[in-house]
Image (cartoon, helix red, strand yellow):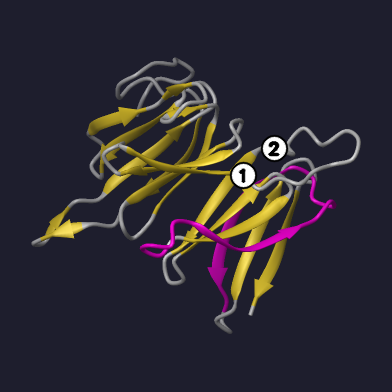
């Protein structure tokens, strides 16, 4: 779908999209899944399609206000059909109803550096959702932050850990292993490594 490197609106003007997530929804046996695309490095929007690929809506523009983005870098959707966008250069996560209505934002919890900070120190680069735990895992600068998104918890921060040894942490994924431990994987762009952390 779309035309490469041609920014714009509508179904045919992607410009370096960054991520995609599929909602899981049905009603009376009717498949209501939708595909949400964070688009991305050239555009500054979220584009939404039916599971069959029909364009339905979009929202966002370049900027720093609500519903504006400066590199929407990652996207997730939770079990309540709330859409989360890692607004990288603005250093925040924006939260929307699936129809695009703005709900809230979380500003990144960034480390304070003595001297020159790394260029990614205020990036909010990525997020990953655990539906079983109702937790969102985020890369906020050099920190990994975990927020409780269960209904009524409003993204309360429950865990944070920091490492100066990470070299531009750029993406995050979570998965359970055969012992049912939660594994957190961090991809580092400059370091060209993947680190694994285990939460027992």
Q: Position of residue 129 (x, y in %)?
A: 48, 59
Give the vertical position of 171 relative to 118 (above or below): below
Tag of residue 108? 1
Give the vertical position of 66 relative to 9 (above or below): below
Q: Name the image quarter holding residue 47.
A: top left
Residues drawn in magenta:
150-177
Q: Position of residue 165 (x, y in %)?
A: 84, 52
Mark 2 vs 1: CB contact within 8 A = yes
Number of numbered tags placed on the structure image? 2
Question: Circle 1 sits in a helix, a strand or a loop, which is it?
Answer: loop
Quadrant of image for the N terminus: top left
Question: Circle 2 sits in a helix, a strand or a loop, which is it?
Answer: loop
* Residue shown at the point (40%, 37%) measured from the top left: 37
Judge the density around disc 2: few (<14), some (14-19), many (≥20) Cα neighbours within 10 Å: many
Judge the density around disc 1: few (<14), some (14-19), many (≥20) Cα neighbours within 10 Å: many
Q: Is residue 156 magenta?
A: yes
Residue highlighted by disc 2: 122
Image-based side of 173 in relation to 29, left or right: right
Image-based side of 178 in relation to 163, left or right: left
Image-based side of 161 in relation to 8, left or right: right
Q: Position of residue 166 (x, y in %)?
A: 79, 50
The earlier-in-sequence mark between 2 and 1 is 1
């Amino acid at each position: 779908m779309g035309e490469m490197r041609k920014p714009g609106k509508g179904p045919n003007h992607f410009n370096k999209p960054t991520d995609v997530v599929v909602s899981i929804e049905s009603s009376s046996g009717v498949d209501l899944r939708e595909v949400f695309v964070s688009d991305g490095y050239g555009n500054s929007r979220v584009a939404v399609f039916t599971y069959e690929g029909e364009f339905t809506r979009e929202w966002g523009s370049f900027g720093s206000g609500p519903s504006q983005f400066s590199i929407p870098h990652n996207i997730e959707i939770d079990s309540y059909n709330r859409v989360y966008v890692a607004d990288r250069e603005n250093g925040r996560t924006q939260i929307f109803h699936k129809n695009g209505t703005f709900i809230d934002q979380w500003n990144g919890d960034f480390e304070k550096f003595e001297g020159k900070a790394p260029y990614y120190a205020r990036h909010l680069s990525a997020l990953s959702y655990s539906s079983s735990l109702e937790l969102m895992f985020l890369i906020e600068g050099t920190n990994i932050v975990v927020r409780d998104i269960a209904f009524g918890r409003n993204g309360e921060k429950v865990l944070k850990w920091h490492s100066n040894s990470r070299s531009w942490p750029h993406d995050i994924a979570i998965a359970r292993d055969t012992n049912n431990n939660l594994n957190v994987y961090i991809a580092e762009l400059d370091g060209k490594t993947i680190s694994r952390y285990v939460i027992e």
